[in-house]
Amino acid sequence: MSTELLRKYIDIINTTNEAWNEPTNVSPSERGKYEGKTKEQLLAQYNALKKTGPHPQGSPEYGKMRELAFAIRAKSDWGKVQ
């Protein structure tokens, strides 16, 4: 790899900022929304919504699918989160 290409690569890495601009605020009523559900129940809900799609971005169904996908990932032992 040439030195010039390596410098460009390093510049790109240094200018890429993937941090959140502001902290995420979750409504207290939304916290623990899927706590009592199993991963299988969440997958069933997700698949049922998926069958009725595709859903346009911004629709309530689209938002629900995103929430379910996140909850499924969270229940898949990522970082041993309960």
Image (cartoon, rainbow, N blue to C red):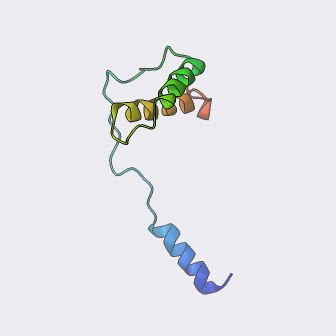
Residue at (62%, 29%) from the top-left corner?
77
Quadrant in which residue 17 is drawn: bottom left
| Location of residue 21 in the rendering, given as x and y in whole percent from the top left corner | 34, 52
| Location of residue 74 in the rendering, given as x and y in whole percent from the top left corner | 54, 30
Q: Is residue 82 left or right of residue 2?
A: left
Residue at (41%, 37%) from the top-left corner?
55
Residue at (38%, 41%) from the top-left corner?
56
Quadrant in which residue 8 is drawn: bottom right
Residue at (34%, 43%) from the top-left corner?
23
| Location of residue 65 in the rendering, given as x and y in whole percent from the top left corner | 45, 32
Q: Is residue 25 left or right of residue 68?
A: left
- Between residue 79 and residue 47, name the one nearer to us: 47
Answer yes or no: is residue 71 visible: no
For the image shown, how many numbered marks are present on the structure?
0
- Between residue 42 and residue 19, name the one nearer to us: 42
- Between residue 54 and residue 14, name the one nearer to us: 54
Quadrant containing the C terminus in the rendered view: top right
| Location of residue 20 in the rendering, given as x and y in whole percent from the top left corner | 39, 50
Quadrant containing the N terminus in the rendered view: bottom right
Answer yes or no: is residue 42 visible: yes
Residue farthest toward the top in the current orientation of the protein: 36
- Between residue 1 and residue 47, name the one nearer to us: 47
